Amino acid sequence: MAKCIKYLFILILITGCNPSVNLHSNFVVDSSFTAEQQNEIVESVSEWESVTDGMIKLNLVFSNQPEMYGNDYNKILNIIDESNYLNTDALGKTNVVASVIRILILSNRIERSQFLFKEVVLHELGHSFGLPHQKSGLMNPSVHGQTCIDNSTLDEFCNLHNCNDYEIKSSCINY
């Protein structure tokens, strides 16, 4: 048993704390998002790809039946039935089911408020790359109108994925 734990520890040291995160992957996007929301998703993915200088590369496919895509595709889903989320103020959630990343966006809640769809998508994509919540910046769990990827988020990304943070630049102008 001790030998297995030792090898697991070595594997974590070699691969980092989140070895299951794939920065080059396929995402199927629920086409029930509005055209404007679909555009925000594309822009958010493009922004992550740009600020990480190509470390992230996501292939997006839009489908009205995203669950029909098997385990080869991660998913960005539009959650219209909020009954499972009544006891939470969540606007989005990222989870992993059978090694498939599922980003759930409660778009009805976002539309009924001043909250910004793009901020939620950028934030949830950050979780899909292994980023935890932070005290400030994009990965703060509270919505505060930030629609760009800030330096503290990129610092955490580089700590997690062993990149040189001087090679990647924030997309924020005022942060």
Image: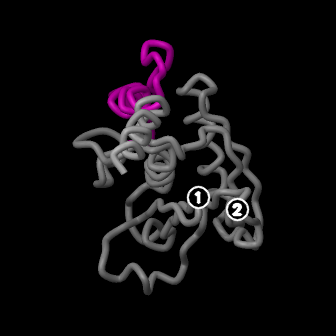
Is residue 55 placed above or below 68 in the rendered structure? above
Q: Nearer the viewer, residue 53 or 170?
A: 53
Is residue 48 placed above or below 35 in the rendered structure? above
**How many C-alpha atoms fall within 10 Å of the one at disc 2: few (<14), some, or many (≥20)?**
some
Q: Quadrant of the C terminus?
A: top left
| C-alpha separation, residue under disc 2 versus residue under disc 1 | 8 Å
Q: Find out whether the residues at labels 2 and 1 contact each other: C-beta distance under 8 Å.
A: yes
Is residue 122 placed above or below 31 in the rendered structure? above
Q: Residue at x 58, y 69 (%)?
A: 78
Residue 169 magenta: yes
Which residue has dot 2 on it? Answer: 71
Q: Residue 170 falls in which quadrant of the image?
A: top left
Q: Amino acid at mark 1?
A: Ser
Specify the principal SS of the magenta part.
loop
Residue 99 - label: 1
Query: Residue 37: where, in percent of width, then height?
Result: 61, 58
Query: Residue 121: where, in percent of width, then height?
Result: 50, 52
In magenta, the rendered stretch is 146-175
At mark 2, the secondary structure is: loop
At mark 1, the secondary structure is: loop
Q: Residue at x 42, y 46 (%)?
A: 4
Is residue 96 placed above or below 118 in the rendered structure? below
Query: Residue 138: where, in percent of width, then height?
Result: 36, 42
Task: Give the left or right position of residue 122, taking residue 114 as reference.
Answer: right
Residue 164 magenta: yes
Q: Residue 45 falls in which quadrant of the image?
A: top right
**How many C-alpha atoms fall within 10 Å of the one at disc 1: few (<14), some, or many (≥20)?**
few
